[in-house]
Amino acid sequence: MRRTLFGVVLLLAITACREQKAASAKPSQAKVDSAIANSKLPGHQGVAGAMRVADSAAARNARLDSVGEGS
């Protein structure tokens, strides 16, 4: 009984560690874009400009969405 319980606990611990590594291994697209925009790679200015436009559009949409909430 102890051996089975130990095996189950060990299996759960290994699974939990494995999932944590997989989740942290892949950065988000925003982090990747930000790293490229801040680098000196060819095209980094275009990525930075696209991020600026996307942020402006998101801010504008948030303002437009909040206009109707006051009623």
Image (cartoon, rainbow, N blue to C red):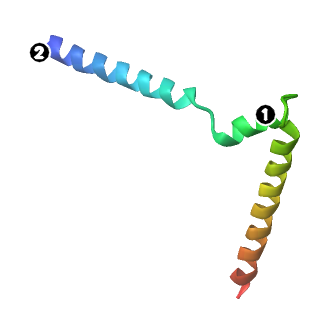
Residue farthest to the left, as pictured: 1
Q: What mark, if any, has residue 1 been given in the picture?
A: 2
Dot 2 falls on a residue whose secondary structure is loop
**Residue for point 84% across, 36% down:** 44
Q: Which residue is mark 1?
A: 36
Residue type marked 2: Met
Q: Is the N terminus in the top left, top right, bottom left or bottom right quadrant? A: top left
Q: Of residues 62 and 8, which is closer to you in this image?
A: 62
Q: Is residue 36 above or below residue 1?
A: below
In the shown orientation, is residue 40 left or right of residue 34?
Answer: right
Left or right side of 3 for 55 = right
Q: Nearer the viewer, residue 27 or 16?
A: 27
What kind of element bears circle 1? helix
Q: Is residue 51 above or below residue 58?
A: above
Q: Which mark is residue 15?
A: none
Residue at the outermost top position: 3
> Can you give x and y, in whole percent of width and height, for residue 9 in the image?
28, 20
Q: Could you tell me residue 35's position as x and y percent?
A: 77, 32
Using the image, determine if residue 14 lies above or below residue 59.
above
Query: Which residue lies at the image location 36% right of the left edge and 24% below the top edge?
Result: 15
> Which circle's residue, 2 or 1, is located before the other in the chain?
2
Q: Quadrant of residue 48?
A: top right
